[in-house]
Amino acid sequence: MKILITGANGMLAKEVKEKFAKGNELILTDVAELDITNEEAVRKFITDTKPDYIINCAAFTAVDKAEECYELANKINADGPTNLAKAAKEVKAKLVHISTDYVFGGDLDVSKDYKEDDPKNPVTVYGKTKLHGEEGIENNLDEYYIFRTAWLYGIGGNNFVKTMTKLGLTKDELNVVADQHGSPTYAKDLAQIIYQAIDKKIPYGVYNATNNGYTTWYDFTKEILKEQEINCKVNPVTTDEYIKMMNVVQAKRPFNSQMSKAKLESYGIKVPEWKDGLKRYLEEAKKIEE
């Protein structure tokens, strides 16, 4: 199978590459090799290479920066996937695209979780542009998978686990937001979900794809430190308190990023718990350090 992976230098793309390397022909591209916002360049590249699958890991993910860079964010998050979908249809390729919980409003009562077909109401530029990307795919292609993920971390680059570990080792106490709810998601597990979906040929469409179980950033931090036996006091604060303490201006964060994985699991996809994912990430990170 020939698989084109865009955004190939990113954290998730590296895990996807590792997962699909055996037995497949991989075509790895980043912006230098393929600018997904250039429709003609995308069309030419894909008609020349004729992949069976396109896994799009390219995205503008800087949530706060997006508020000031709508045009650029929309080009990457909306025009890019749309261009890929149009070209994929031309060569009869399947498209896998990574989306986000930010397409929802994030204000659902935390006793509930979002289902794939719940109303979309993005309140940030990032969320709006990612929704535009989903719509561009849906309007131009039938054979696609859109996986909505959240709270993603993994090997390579900065991430929440690495940041909290560093702070826990250097500070006596931390103030962490306790009123935002979601599922920490290990990039390796998301890559495994994508692999299973393709391998099992589950029905095309939109799927929520995070690790199982729900928590808060506060409880996630406590688990990160506990797993590494780091002694640091963690104080729960509200989002508003955190913004005032840190004197930061940021895009609105969803209070509820909880997404049901029932649809994925109904097709036999195995979805690990977030605590299990965290343990395996820490083990891998430790091996790399050694």
Image (spheres, helix red, strand yellow):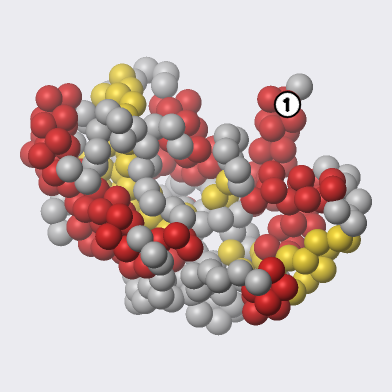
Q: Residue at x 14, y 44 (%)?
A: 39
The residue shown at (32%, 63%) is: 70
Front-lying residue, 228 or 237: 237
The image position of residue 277, as x and y in percent, is 64, 44
Number of labelled discs?
Answer: 1
Mark 1: secondary structure: helix
Residue at point 65% right, 79% down?
Answer: 240
Q: Is residue 124 above or below residue 146?
A: below
Say if 229 sits above or below 18 in the image. below
Name the residue beneath numbered marker 1.
289
Q: Position of residue 29 (x, y in %)?
A: 31, 29
Task: Quarter of the image for the N terminus: give it.
Answer: top left
Question: Is residue 17 shown left or right of residue 273?
Answer: left
Query: Which residue is rendered at x = 12% and y = 25% of the image?
Result: 48
Q: What residue type is disc 1 on? A: Glu
User: Looking at the image, can residue 186 be seen?
Assistant: no
| Image position of 210 with respect to 91: above or below | below
Q: Quadrant of residue 71?
A: bottom left
Q: Position of residue 85 (x, y in %)?
A: 18, 47
* Pick the front one: 121 or 147: 121
Whether residue 251 is visible: yes
Rendered location of residue 288, percent (x, y):
69, 25
Q: Residues within 10 Å of mark 1 (few under 14, many from 20)?
A: few
- The quadrant of the rendering that contains the C terminus is top right
- Describe residue 16's horizontal placement relative to residue 81 as left or right: right
